[in-house]
Image (cartoon, rainbow, N blue to C red):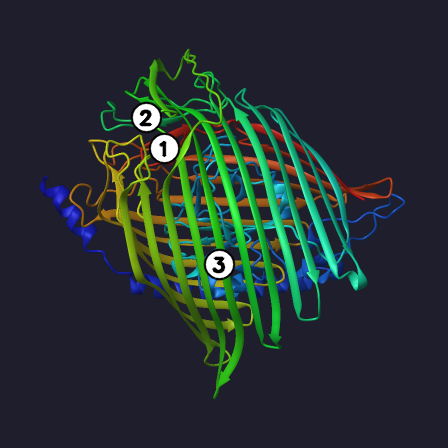
């Protein structure tokens, strides 16, 4: 190590605490901006006619039964909501349900209508407007749910929930048409959800029966020839509408943008019963079968790669990389039953149990890149995998007073058993097919059947008790304290059933603390601290130490933020620092733990209604990361963490054509280190998307027409997927959809 490198390392590793002056300066700026921005928006709102403000808040126009176009009418909920949805209730696991604005952590909510307008096709599309989220996903492949949040990957084993219930997300693309909204808790979820990586937690919220009947049908088209049909039916029946039922069905089939094929069927059922004034019961089920072929392979950058930069970019729409025989077939099943009981006016008891089952049949290539000219070796992996999750949780939520203080209490317990089944050595193939080049058609083929043999490879058991108390000290000040106590056991097995590795620990404590201040009823300033522990990783077959189990990693997060929501504008901002044990692949292709990864950053976003017709939203993240206290990469940037990202969206309600809304959004992702050695970057890139939505009335029925063009400029770029893995970004795609409500 030369003197310059040694000085750089010293500077980096001494930054072990948040910068108080920067935090104070940012909060001062945020409070001042909130005050000034609020006055400006209020003046604009006062200047606009009342009917115009109402129409602008909705962004949608109603049409009379005879086809005329009257003034827009919306309900009060629509008027108060903004694109950030800060007053929307979100699930926080052990914290219970509270609005985003009252949650002392950074969160994002994307509603079902947002998903429909964006015509999301993978998880990266869902959070396209959030600068803290980097898209690492590829549609129609096992990578479809890969994203990083604040530079940290979300754990596909523990970071995904459906209605708060765990399931294994690997290879599963959710039917977004069947969802009410998607929630993202950024950063550590240890207290709220138990063992999980610190990237965050994604919670898919399914549609349930409401008080009003729903009958809708929509059809869609996506390049190059994927057709979708979706039906949504909801009814209440019985005395006083005691029982409710809602069913959503989606079928998707056709040729994808890279000459692959998709055939997916998904059905979601939600039943509920309001048995008494205080007692509700419910049952939810999801079943999805998906078969796809022709996936674009991932590209692995080994330590032996020669070249100072990545090869020239290629289009994600090419099928030259898709060696014949590749496919991904998945099956998802989730069944949930629960009871909600109002014990007293201020106390409720909730309990639920769920069972999820995920199966995968994969035949996929990994291209090991050799040099900057694009030469590679094609290695094919083929096998079957399966996972099961059994989960139970019970909570008491209520309010009490002790002297002048009001308490919001949550007590609960949870039990989870996860099993993982992987292919036997005899039925799993991992072979090199041959050599090729990125800029020439891949000539290799490997075909395989399904129903290959599996064995019980590992089992994870968690039992947890948790408690939290949010104390209202004054009308403005409140403090939160929470504690989760977990007994954790993890075992891996040989094909013969013998235990090959085990980790167990009782009494794992993951605390959280927060201090909140209400600047006004619609503005919260907070500071929070949370810890998390993630399960030890079972090393995959692609590494030299395949089959070994790494130690669990503890993470810590410090955050200071502000959230504010108003009728015509909303904003949020946060400073954060995350400390996590570093895991990476070394030059000997060994997956190892060494030192600590540090993530420090600022994220800020806002949305404002300008006049009657314009809505402008923006989001930005500045991120500083480095490895510290290790033996190899001290001071280098953490792989997969861009230093700068920014997103913006503009929508325009066309006054001459009531019901027509035009929109455009853009997202810039800064250059990203591909591997911990810090010698290769993906390069920064910006994607621009445009779209239009038109609401009208045909034959006495509400009709919504939607069109979207993603990657308008057909930009070619390298997408970071995982440590030392990249893929070509998706090409320009066109999506169309027509929905009718009966």
Q: How many marks?
A: 3
Q: Report the disc number at residue 683.
A: 1
Q: CA distance from mark 3 to mark 1?
A: 28 Å
Residue annotated with mark 3: 572
Evaluate if marks 1 and 2 touch, with contact meaning CB atoms under 8 Å apart.
yes
Residue 172 x %, y %: 51, 38
Residue 294 versus residue 528: which sits nearer the camera? 294
Query: Which of the image's four quarters has the C terminus?
Result: top right
**Residue 558 seen in the figure:** no
Specify whether 323 is left or right of 311: right
Residue 339 versus residue 77: which sits nearer the camera? 339
The residue located at (29%, 58%) in the rendering is 505
The residue located at (74%, 58%) in the rendering is 243
Specify whether 444 is left or right of 397: left
10 Å crowding of disc 1: few (<14), some (14-19), many (20+): some
Of callouts 3 and 1, the N-terminal one: 3
Residue 344 x %, y %: 61, 77
Residue 522 versus residue 298: which sits nearer the camera? 298
Residue annotated with mark 2: 310
10 Å crowding of disc 3: few (<14), some (14-19), many (20+): many
The residue located at (17%, 47%) in the rendering is 9
Secondary structure found at label 1: loop
> Which residue of the protein is positioned furthest toward the bottom in this rendering?
403
For residue 77, which quarter of the picture? bottom right
């Amino acid at each position: 190590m030369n003197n310059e490198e040694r000085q750089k390392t010293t500077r980096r590793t001494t930054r072990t605490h948040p910068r108080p002056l920067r935090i104070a300066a940012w909060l001062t700026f945020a409070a001042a901006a909130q005050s000034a921005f609020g006055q400006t928006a209020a003046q604009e709102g006062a200047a606009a006619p009342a009917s115009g403000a109402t129409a602008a808040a909705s962004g949608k126009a109603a049409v009379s039964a005879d086809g005329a176009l009257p003034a827009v009418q919306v309900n009060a909920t629509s008027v108060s909501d903004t694109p950030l949805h800060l007053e929307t209730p979100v699930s926080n696991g052990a914290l219970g349900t509270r609005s985003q604005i009252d949650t002392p952590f950074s969160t994002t909510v994307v509603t079902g209508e947002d998903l429909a307008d964006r015509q999301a096709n993978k998880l990266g599309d869902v959070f396209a407007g959030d600068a803290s989220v980097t898209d690492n996903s590829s549609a129609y492949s096992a990578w479809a749910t890969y994203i990083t949040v604040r530079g940290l990957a979300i754990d596909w084993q523990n970071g995904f929930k459906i209605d708060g219930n765990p399931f294994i997300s690997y290879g599963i693309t959710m039917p977004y048409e069947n969802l009410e909204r998607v929630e993202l808790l950024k950063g550590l979820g240890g207290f709220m959800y138990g063992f999980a990586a610190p990237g965050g937690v994604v919670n898919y919220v399914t549609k349930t029966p409401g008080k009003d009947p729903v009958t809708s049908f929509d059809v869609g088209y996506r390049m190059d020839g994927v057709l979708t049909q979706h039906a949504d039916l909801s009814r209440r029946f019985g005395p006083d509408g005691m029982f409710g039922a809602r069913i959503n069905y989606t079928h998707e089939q056709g040729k994808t943008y890279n000459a692959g094929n998709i055939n997916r069927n998904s059905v979601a059922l939600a039943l509920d019963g309001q048995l008494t004034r205080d007692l509700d019961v419910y049952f939810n089920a999801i079943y999805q079968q998906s078969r796809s072929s022709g996936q674009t392979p991932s590209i692995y950058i080994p330590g032996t790669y020669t070249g100072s930069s990545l090869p020239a970019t290629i289009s994600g729409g090419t099928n030259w990389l898709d060696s014949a025989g590749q496919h991904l077939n998945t099956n998802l099943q989730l069944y949930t039953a629960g009871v909600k009981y109002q014990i007293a006016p201020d106390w409720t008891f909730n309990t639920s149990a769920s069972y999820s089952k995920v199966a995968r049949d994969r035949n996929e290539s990994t291209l090991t890149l050799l040099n900057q000219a694009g030469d590679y070796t094609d290695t094919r992996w083929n096998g079957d995998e399966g996972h099961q999750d059994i989960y139970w949780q019970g909570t008491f939520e209520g309010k009490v007073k002790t002297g002048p203080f009001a308490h919001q209490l949550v007590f609960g317990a949870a039990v989870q058993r996860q099993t993982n089944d992987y292919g036997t050595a005899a039925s799993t193939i991992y072979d090199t097919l041959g050599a090729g080049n990125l800029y020439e058609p891949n000539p290799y083929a490997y075909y395989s059947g399904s129903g290959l043999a599996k064995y019980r490879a590992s089992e994870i058991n968690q039992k947890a008790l948790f408690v939290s108390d949010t104390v209202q000290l004054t009308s403005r000040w409140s403090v939160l304290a929470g504690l989760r106590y977990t007994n954790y056991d993890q075992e891996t097995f040989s094909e013969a059933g013998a235990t090959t590795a085990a980790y167990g620990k009782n009494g794992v404590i993951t605390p959280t603390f927060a201090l909140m201040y209400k600047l006004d009823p619609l503005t919260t300033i907070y500071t929070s601290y949370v810890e998390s522990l993630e399960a030890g990783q079972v090393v995959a077959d692609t590494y030299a130490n395949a089959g070994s189990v790494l130690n669990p990693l503890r993470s810590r997060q410090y955050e200071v933020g502000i959230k504010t929501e108003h009728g015509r504008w909303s904003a949020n901002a946060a400073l954060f620092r995350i400390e996590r044990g570093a895991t990476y692949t070394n030059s000997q292709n060994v997956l190892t733990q060494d030192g600590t990864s540090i993530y420090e950053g600022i994220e800020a976003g806002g949305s404002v209604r300008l006049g009657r017709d314009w809505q402008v939203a923006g989001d930005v993240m500045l991120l500083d990361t480095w490895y510290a206290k290790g033996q190899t990469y001290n001071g280098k940037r953490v792989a997969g963490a861009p230093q700068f990202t920014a997103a913006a969206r503009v929508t325009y309600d066309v006054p001459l054509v009531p019901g027509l809304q035009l929109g455009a959004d853009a997202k810039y992702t800064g250059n990203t280190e591909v591997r911990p050695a810090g010698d290769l970057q993906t390069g920064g890139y910006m994607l621009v998307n445009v779209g239009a939505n038109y609401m009208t009335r045909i034959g006495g029925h509400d009709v919504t027409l939607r069109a979207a063009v993603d990657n308008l400029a057909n930009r070619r770029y390298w997408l970071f997927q995982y440590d030392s893995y990249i893929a070509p970004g998706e090409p320009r795609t066109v999506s169309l959809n027509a929905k009718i409500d009966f």
